Image (spheres, helix red, strand yellow):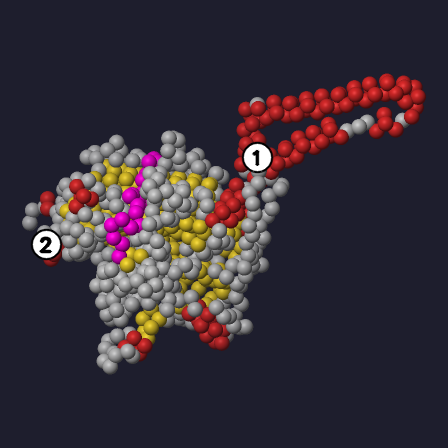
Amino acid sequence: MGDDLDSTDDIQLTSLIGGSKRAPRQSDQDTADDDDYNDVDRRIIIHRPLELETNSSLEVKFGKRRRRRLNRFVKLFVALTAALLVIASVLWRLLPANREQDTKGAMDSSKTDTVEDEPNPPTLPDSIQIFYPPKTQQEIAALNAELSKFSDPIITKEEFFGKTTLPPPPNYPDFTYTSDLHFTSKRTALLFAPGVYEGIDFEVSYYTSVLGLGAKPTDVLFTNCDKGPHVDAINKYTSRPPWGSALDNFWRSVENIATNPKEGMRWAASQAAPLRRVHVQSDLLLYDGDAWASGGVLANAIVDGKVNFGGQQQYLLRNVDLKQGAVNGAWSLVLVGCRGETPLENNGFESGPSISVDDSPKLRIEKPFITMKENSELELRVPLAKFAQSDHDDILGSQFGGEEVRNFTGVKLGVPSTDGADNYLSLQKSLDEGKDLVLSPGEYPLAASLEVKHPNQVILGLGYATLKAPVDGSPCILVHPKVPGVRIAGIMLEASVLTDNNMPSSSSLLQWGMPGVDDIGDGTNPGLLSDIFCRVGGASYDRHVSTDVMIQLYSGNIYGDNLWLWRADHVKLHPGEEANFPHISSYYRQTVMGECQVRIGMKVYGRAVTMIGLFIEHTTEDQLIWEGDDGYVAFYQCELPYDVDQSYADKSFVGYRVGSDVESHTARGVGIYSNFRDFDVNVATAISLPESDGIVMNNLFTVYLDNQGKINSVVNGKGPGPASVSDRGRPFRCSDKTCQNDISD
């Protein structure tokens, strides 16, 4: 969705630089075997029986001729024996059972004696800050001052209006946060050690993650504060003043804390800004006045007060305990696995947002997270997959506990380099050794794909760690087929300028499985994609960044949890460059045809793939193509591209396509929007799917946001569309094969 550290002595802060680069090498087993062969060869070459050379009695008894013959015989015998040993070793390895054992040993290098443990606690780079509970008023003031350095820049009313002779309007706030860091390269993780944080208030900035280090959210408690960690609307003097906007409040998060602010917890954010594993002991305010916001995700949480969506266009609640219910919202609310005072299902035909409720999900997988022990050692906690049983306690509501705990001695903490080869070699070596990978905040250009080959391996990013795709079009991450239980979470994936001017048809940012390899996955140990945010364009000055498909899923039994796949509709301005559509925004350039190219957001070929919270925007062809059976989607938000012409509609591109051979597919809460800025584009329908009893789609809708053109129908040519500009912002709906225009007045 687009535009429409200095520390004090009183506070303990950990800010150290660490990480090392190592060149890849052969597996330890192979290296050891090669050394054995070389030693045998050396023994064959240099061995001389010393007894024969030094025993003069032999020389007297047999004579020189006999001694030379005996020496030759002994040398030949030793050589033949060594050769036979080598041949026997090779033949032993060729036996199927032994070959499989050797292969497993080479692959599972984490179990070999030669793999070095990682340090625990690890040395942390400056992009990771650890804070400890303040104990005095002086420490509280110092910590607030320190945390303010990680918030968005502000401008005061006096500074903004000081350039004019007009007095500031009385209803304007005293200051506003700005979007100056919208495309910064800075990444930050703010880690909070277990304890109570009294009187702490700070705004959470772009590319910043607030992470509690306790085993449960209440281990890190913000209390006796006004706001605690929070997000307000930005640019309140320039964007629909005095309200500002939350449409561009992307790329920030809060996880694994409890908070009890006097004013309620305000989180006026949009895509890629999840609240996860939190206990809000007050009201939760997902809006800021009349500022527009374009949707978000609250997952695995408890809210003691009321959840107020305000004007949020759409929102997903997954596994949330709602103690006092939820109110408001604009177009669509989706609740999966929630408990408490949950709102009732509603198709939205008459009024209010549509409300989609799944109170019996089949599966949940929570995101891995980090905890800290009393001795400052870190642990990686990996929640286990939970499946629907007769007792729904494991599948409904919040859940804190029961994770697999992994020592950080088996976790590589990645630290970014500007050299793509360094990043690849260091990170891939650790993956090949069977270690888990935690990426510290920063940008990681890659010379080649990071390949995941070990079951149950974790790649976890902190502070919006960003992998930049190899320039040959290969993906940032490639998960090999038939590798179950892999967890990939908390990572941004960014397109690069490809070396081949003709964009490879197979290029992507993430690929799971291989084309042509039948991999249904493991239904008892599914894979996880959690908080994965793809970006084609935006932060790069070069508008020729591209890829073909952002994510391709060939394997089955993958669980997606909050994915945003974004072709940038606005990009960073060059120094001195003026905005091309200043009436939309003076801060950015609006993307036009031919820039930041990507055809398709996601292709799903695997069976039994689940997506809970999927956002795809602005790709130049179909946004989503689903070819696998038994797929499930809860909450889908999509914007069609702004910059295409009528040829886009003539080629029948849609926002959501289910393949003609698919026999079973379920989706709920599917919204597709149009904002054709440059041309009058009339799209026939938003959703294309087979007419089959196995295809179940509830609470589908389109919205005409602004500008020209429209989407004429909701699904397969059925359902109403906008008739005039007066229909701007109004949802047009279908649900369970019934549409609004099917109902007589």
Residue 443 disc label: none
Q: Is residue 550 above or below residue 297?
A: above
Secondary structure type for disc 2: loop
Q: Quadrant of residue 184?
A: bottom left
The image position of residue 314, as x and y in percent, is 25, 54
Q: Nearer the viewer, residue 355 or 392?
A: 355
Q: Amino acid at mark 2?
A: Ser
Near mark 1 (Cα within 10 A), the count class, few <14, some 14-19 or many ≥20, is some
Magenta-drawn stretch contains 673 = no
Instruction: Provide the residue span drawn in magenta.
Output: 590-615
Distance Cα–Cα, label 1 vs label 2: 67 Å
Specify the quadrant that holds the N terminus: bottom left
Which dot, 1 or 2, sits closer to the camera? 2
> Could you tell me which residue is drawn at 77 percent across and 29 percent down?
47
The image position of residue 105, as x and y in percent, is 57, 35
> Could you tell me which residue is drawn at 19 percent across and 35 percent down?
691
Using residue 346 as the reference point, say whether residue 284 is left or right of it.
Answer: right
Using residue 375 as the reference point, say whether residue 529 is left or right of it.
Answer: left
Q: Quadrant of residue 239?
A: bottom left
Number of marks in picture: 2
Q: Are marks 1 and 2 in contact (CB under 8 Å)?
A: no
Q: Nearer the viewer, residue 62 or 716?
A: 62
Circle 1 is placed at which residue position?
Answer: 105
Secondary structure type for disc 1: helix
Q: Amino acid at mark 1?
A: Gly
Circle 2 is placed at which residue position?
Answer: 724
Using residue 466 as the reference point, say whether residue 637 is left or right of it.
Answer: left
Q: Is residue 36 above or below residue 139?
A: above
Q: Is residue 175 above or below residue 547?
A: below
